[in-house]
């Protein structure tokens, strides 16, 4: 019976491997390892060609769109909502006029998204998708 000393101790009182580690030590043992990604599906590849516009400076998004366009993609999609719509138009025009002259506006989709807030109200948010194609 000497082999099995932990039978009499409840599970929650057994010693955990991570308790011996200092607080600032990396917790490699506690975190599960990431699995290798499978091949991207058709939708994932479309997301690779999409740049979402937000609050960062305009030139960050210009660089992102130019990088996607120069990486071999035939089409780049710029998406924005609300106050970022004007920045999305600026990004598309800067890329087309200064960085990748062979890009043309293929299509523009303008929609209104209805969002539900926590207090039960709904609000309408405008959104735009600009499709640039070589």
Image (cartoon, rainbow, N blue to C red):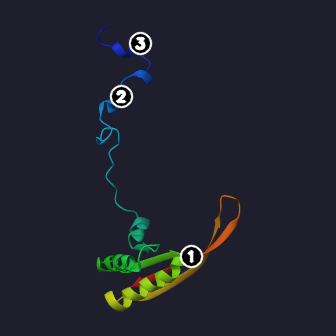
- Distance of label 2 from label 1 (alpha carbons): 49 Å
Depth order, front residue of 69/42? 69
Q: Is residue 22 above or below residue 119?
A: above
Choose the circle earlier in sequence order: 2 or 1: 2
Residue receiving disc 2? 16
Q: Quadrant of residue 103?
A: bottom left
Residue receiving disc 3? 8
Q: Secondary structure at mark 2?
A: loop
**Does residue 100 appear anywhere in the picture?**
no
Choose the circle earlier in sequence order: 1 or 3: 3
Residue receiving disc 1? 82
Q: Taking 104 as reference, is 111 left or right? A: right
In the image, residue 49 lies at what x, y percent? 39, 73
- Distance of label 1 from label 3 (alpha carbons): 62 Å
Q: Quadrant of residue 10?
A: top left
- x 42%, y 71%: residue: 46
Neighbourhood count class around disc 3 (C-alpha, 10 Å): few under 14, some 14–19, many 20 upward: few
Depth order, front residue of 26/63? 26
Q: Quadrant of residue 45?
A: bottom left
Choose the circle earlier in sequence order: 3 or 2: 3
């Amino acid at each position: 019976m000497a082999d099995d000393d932990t039978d009499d101790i409840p599970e929650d009182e057994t010693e955990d491997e991570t308790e011996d580690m200092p607080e600032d030590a990396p917790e490699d043992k506690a975190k599960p390892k990431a699995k290798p990604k499978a091949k991207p599906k058709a939708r994932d590849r479309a997301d690779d060609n999409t740049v979402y516009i937000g609050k960062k400076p305009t030139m960050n998004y210009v660089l992102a769109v130019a990088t996607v366009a120069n990486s071999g993609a035939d089409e780049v999609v710029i998406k924005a909502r609300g106050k970022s719509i004007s920045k999305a138009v600026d990004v598309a025009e800067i890329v087309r006029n200064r960085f990748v002259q062979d890009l043309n506006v293929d299509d523009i989709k303008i929609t209104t998204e209805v969002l539900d807030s926590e207090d039960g109200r709904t609000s309408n948010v405008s959104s735009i998708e600009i499709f640039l194609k070589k």
